[in-house]
Image: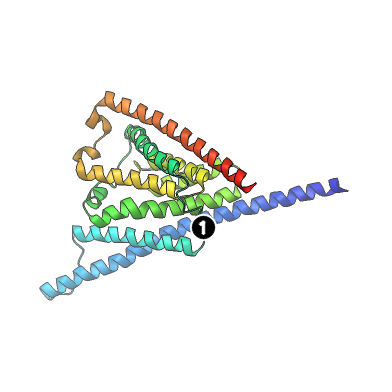
Amino acid sequence: MEDRYLPHVRNINLYIIKQKKTISMKTTIKLLLLYVATQILATSIINFFVYSYFTLQNYISTGMFQITSPSETGNLYSIILTLLLSNIFFCWYLIHGQYVPTDRKTWSAYSRPVMLMIIPLTLSSMLWMNYAVESLPLDDRLETLFNHMNSNILGIVSISIVAPIMEEMLFRGAIEGSLLKAWKHPSYAIIVSALIFGLIHGNPIQIPFAFVHGLILGWLFYKTGSLLPGILLHFINNSISTALGIILPQSSQSMEMIFGKANSIILSISGLIITVISIYIINRLTQKSRIETEEIQK
């Protein structure tokens, strides 16, 4: 009798799995569309006030009413405020909409050894990733914008602090978290979320770098269940890039132009080796922590 019902049970299970996948993909698409819409809306609102300000200034000084374009500084502040406000709003939306859990596990530091290993993992991965990306014939369409943002305190806060928090909440906490619940193989969720993370940057030279970093960030979230390791990695990466843009004018040049070809290759290979070792150590640490947790629960 029981064997007669087995096919029906399998069909129900397959249907449930299919429904979960459909819901997770709908959630992903919905969040991405909302993210883009938030950026567009924030841009429209900020531009309205910026243009109004410069138009009013022109009217006061000339007595003529004419829509006046903002200065270069005005445009910069417009972009920075748009990024800040839209990202802060989206952080609130992800929490308020319960797309990102607020439980202790999601926002814990996981363990001190894992958090410490994030430092060599970040620094080493930046070496070989930068060298690899620089070898590709890709344009940096946002170089001028980033240089201007690096000279503004609000721009630095936006790049180094707000962006890492919002992007980890969206791409790891909300999108990857949803895909992990629906898909049997975690690697699929990690790869898809990393691909979306890379493409959403838009800038050709950033896409491959963001994709590979997205794989590491996605793996960290899967192994730890916490957003903080990824936020720390993201923060270190963006902060170092910003600091180099301020301190070294040569940072916009390639590693070969700064260190020479031979030294760049040595640094890249060394960075790759340290990255692999760091990932191995973090993997061992998370496995040990998981075993200890299971033993406590028993």
User: Can residue 67 be seen from the camera position used here?
Assistant: no
Q: Is residue 240 above or below residue 254?
A: below
Vertically, is 170 above or below 211?
A: below
Who's the residue at 24% across and 27% down the image? 260
Tell me: 90 left or right of 257.
Answer: right
Judging depth in this view, the residue of 196 and 235 nearest the camera is 235
**Percent x, y for residue 215?**
46, 41
In percent of width and height, residue 35 lies at 43, 58
Give left or right: position of 227 versus 143: right
| Residue placed most toward the observer, 25 or 262 | 262
The residue indicated by pointer 1 is: 103
Other residues around mark 1 within 10 Å, as few (<14) / some (14–19) / many (≥20): few
Residue 101 sits above or below residue 138 on the image: below
Q: Is residue 148 left or right of residue 271?
A: left
Q: How many marks?
A: 1
Q: Position of residue 7 (x, y in %)?
A: 79, 47
Q: Residue at the right extreme?
A: 1
Residue 166 visible to the viewer: yes
Amino acid on which the number 1 mark rests in the picture = Asp
Q: Residue at x 69, y 52 (%)?
A: 15
